[in-house]
Amino acid sequence: MFSDFATIFIRSGKGGDGHVSFRRELYVAAGGPNGGDGGKGGDVIFEVDKGMNTLYEYRHKHHFKAEHGEEGGKQNKTGKNGADLIIKVPEGTIIRDKESGKIIADMSGDNTRVTVLKGGRGGKGNQHYATATMQVPKYAQPGQKARELEVTLELKCIADVGLVGFPNVGKSTLLSRVSNARPKIANYHFTTINPNLGVVDLAGAKGFVMADIPGLIEGAAQGVGLGHRFLKHIERTKVIVHVIDAASTEGRDPIADIKAINKELELYNKDFLKRPQIIAANKIDAIYEDTNDVIEKIKAEFEPDIKVFPISAVSGKGVKELLFYIRKVLDEVGDDITVYETEFDPSEFNDNEELPFEVKKLSENLYDISGPRIERMLGYTNLDNEKGFLFFQNFLKNNGILDQLEELGIQDGDTVKIYGHQFDYYK
């Protein structure tokens, strides 16, 4: 079953905690620290699978989690890294941050593999904290926490040419004749409810990808019917081909139909009308009056701005001329795929030792420590256990924060605020 939208929850792996251990050897009274580092947590990676054309499998499975890194071990052994999680998506999938709606990645063109969430780094074992004055450190660094994100996946077809038109005008029939696509075809409205793509091969010329966009109706730009779902699949196409029922087999006016479709395109995205358009006047084999009169009326209305090709998708008459003209127009506009720019970078979750912080004196006995670097540290430090609190104290010392507090005149018993935490200071 076709699906072009899904919402999923992703989480990278937590970094493994550093280990606290000491050498225990015969005849060695007090061995030094030998706690190993924790392993890195797994990344969450999105990868294009050329064999996929739907997001259906993500309609029922919503949670995806990478493996955690393992804790470090004795004898300086580093914990095993957590396995990366690879999520396969069809080409043309746009990944957005659900909360902001901003684009994280467009899996199109050269973007075939993107790391969206990095796994937490492993914590350092106690072997790293031995100094001349602290030879038996009983603390190690906790692993960095996992990162979580809720994202939406939206599939926008990648095609050079989009076939548009009202239901039952012959778009699917045309696509099946000129390409390897085999859409379901029947004589009733809304036969096609999913976009179909086919590769058109031309003798002596470069081929192209053509998409049969499901039948539009008036009001589609306002979301009537499945309008928005259909219209978004035109966004990447370079050339728009209007397929009309020139024979008016169902009593429709083909000229009015083209104007109505263009109105819907303009309401949805004004840039659509800037793209080259071609008219495929289909079903000429079913015209009972003078075929030339019918085609001339359509040409008089739209040419020279929009070229008109009388065709029969059933018999193939006029189709070759249409395809080679489409190729000519594509050569003029170029082959670059429309790739949407990244608007939201989840790498902001990653550690950055250059991030700023600020130490302030709020009143006589109250001090405040804040800033992005402090927030990041609190994000992967558990202050509720002894090991985490010792690491926290070491962090304050190594970053010069204790020195700045002393320069501001802090005294034993004064209070230090760090976001939601408060501590009494003692040297």
Image (cartoon, rainbow, N blue to C red):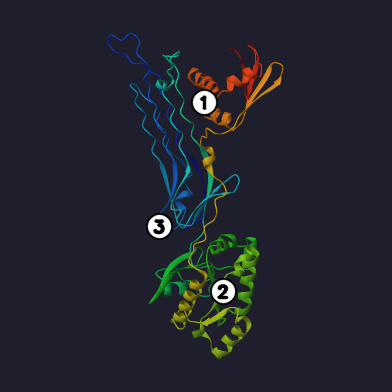
Can you identify the residue that label 3 sits on?
A: 50
Residue 253 appears in the rendering? no
User: Farthest residue in the right direction?
Assistant: 363
Q: Quadrant of residue 269?
A: bottom right
Circle 3 crowding by C-alpha within 10 Å: few under 14, some 14–19, many from 20: few
Element type at mark 3: loop
Can you identify the residue that label 1 sits on?
A: 381
Dot label at residue 115: none
The answer for how far apart the CA atoms under marks 2 and 1 are is 59 Å
For residue 269, above or below residue 112: below
The answer for how far apart the CA atoms under marks 1 and 3 are is 41 Å
| Earlier-in-chain disc, 1 versus 3 | 3
Q: Amino acid at mark 1?
A: Thr
Q: How many marks?
A: 3
Q: Amino acid at mark 3?
A: Lys
Q: Quadrant of residue 422?
A: top right
| Disc 1 + disc 3, Cβ < 8 Å | no
Position of 386 with respect to 264 (left or right) is: left
Element type at mark 2: strand
Q: Residue at x 45, y 14 (%)?
A: 134
Q: Residue at x 42, y 38 (%)?
A: 42
Dot label at residue 277: 2
Residue 361 appears in the rendering? yes
Position of 63 with respect to 362 (left or right) is: left
The N terminus lies in quadrant:
bottom left
Q: Nearer the viewer, mark 1 or mark 3?
A: 1
| Earlier-in-chain disc, 2 versus 3 | 3
Position of 208 with respect to 189 (left or right) is: left
